[in-house]
């Protein structure tokens, strides 16, 4: 398979959760010389396997996967780190005469990779801990008010209940002594030296995707999600506001383990949260769509054949 441009080729396989991205990626790997790069903000965590739907060891042995199991659940990983790591991995894959196949549903990571990011400071564990302790005492709405005093523009676009974004905006203010909104206005470094083929898996019937989501979450519970979360919380100093435990499924499991919800509520809340995630992912996909994006119905019975034909047609 040869490139149609002077730039090396890359394949972006995007879609909401439960759209079948992993299966399509493995089918592509059987038919094209690719190595898979995970574009998933949850799969970067070690020890978090069930709830992130990571590929099993047999799959990893057959097809090279990258950017999985990078950090422990009490560590932080940013979009900027993802961009840097991914460009390095893509370069190495290309040097092996293979094609990087980027697969996942973390749309912010895809956008950061192609469009670049403003220069923001890396996460600071001590500053974050200070903010979290203040939030425990005052509540996140009060922290949002503090943000409004330091960075009115950021506070206006962040909900008072959005603890993750409030924390990050305050952290940037404390570390840089500048409003994050001002830093974000600086020009981005947007060098992306690849010709990307964009494949988007979109459901023709949202209700069918919801059924898949429900089945998937129930399967995760049956495969030991609760036990996985118990072990993680014993091994690492985590709170429910830790980025790793904000992942869909993990947050609900924590509430269950803390006796704040029962088993039926756990399942209902987990499914609802996953549906909301899928909705956000589809919104991102619409905003990122270009005339070069090829959409496929993720519910089609012959989806692997369709994707395979498409990739054969656009290559020589």
Image: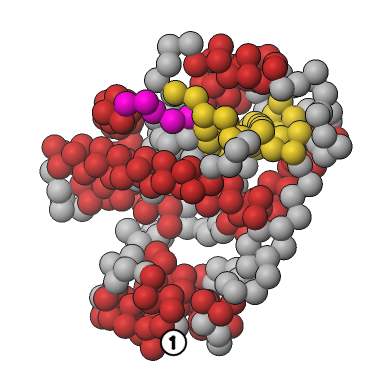
Please say if 130 is above or below 216: below
Please say if 240 is above or below 143: above
Please say if 147 is above or below 196: below
User: Depth check: 33 or 200 in front?
Assistant: 200
Magenta-colored stretch includes residue 203: yes
Please give left or right for residue 108 compared with residue 240 in the image. right
From where the camera sits, is residue 206 visible?
Answer: yes
**Residue occupying the point 49% across, 48% down:** 287
- Residue at the disc numbered 1: 150
From where the camera sits, is residue 229 visible?
Answer: no
Q: Residues within 10 Å of mark 1 (few under 14, many from 20)?
A: some
**Residue occupying the point 63% across, 14% down:** 309
Residue 28: image quadrant is top right
> How far across and how far down the image is residue 161, in percent?
28, 67
Magenta-colored stretch includes residue 184: no
**Residue occupying the point 37% across, 26% down:** 204
Stretch of the chain drawn in magenta: 201-205
Please give left or right for residue 115 compared with residue 202 in the image. right
């Amino acid at each position: 398979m040869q490139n149609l441009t002077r730039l090396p080729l890359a394949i972006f396989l995007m879609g909401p959760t439960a759209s079948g991205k992993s299966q399509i990626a493995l089918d592509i790997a059987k038919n094209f010389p690719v190595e898979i790069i995970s574009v998933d903000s949850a799969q970067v965590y070690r020890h978090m396997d069930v709830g992130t739907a990571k590929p099993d060891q047999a799959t990893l042995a057959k097809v090279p996967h990258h950017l999985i199991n990078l950090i422990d659940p009490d560590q932080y990983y940013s979009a900027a780190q993802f961009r840097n790591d991914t460009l390095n991995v893509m370069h190495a894959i290309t040097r092996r005469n293979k094609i990087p196949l980027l697969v996942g549903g973390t749309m912010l990571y895809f956008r950061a990779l192609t469009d670049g990011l403003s220069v923001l400071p890396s996460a600071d564990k001590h500053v974050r801990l200070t903010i979290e302790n203040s939030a425990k005492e005052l509540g996140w709405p009060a922290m949002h008010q503090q943000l409004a005093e330091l960075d009115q523009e950021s506070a206006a676009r962040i909900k008072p209940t959005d603890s993750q974004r409030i924390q990050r905006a305050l952290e940037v203010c404390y570390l840089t002594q500048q409003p994050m909104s001002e830093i974000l206005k600086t020009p981005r470094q947007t060098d992306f030296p690849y010709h990307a083929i964009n494949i988007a898996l979109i459901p023709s019937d949202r209700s069918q995707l919801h059924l898949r989501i429900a089945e998937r979450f129930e399967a995760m519970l049956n495969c030991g999600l609760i036990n996985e979360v118990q072990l993680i919380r014993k091994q690492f100093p985590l709170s429910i506001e830790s980025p790793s435990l904000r992942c869909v499924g993990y947050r609900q499991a924590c509430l269950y383990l803390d006796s704040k919800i029962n088993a039926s509520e756990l399942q209902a809340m987990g499914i609802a949260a996953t549906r909301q995630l899928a909705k956000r992912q589809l919104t991102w996909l619409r905003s990122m769509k270009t005339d070069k994006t090829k959409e496929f119905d993720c519910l089609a019975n012959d989806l692997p054949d369709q994707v395979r034909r498409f990739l054969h047609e656009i290559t020589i």
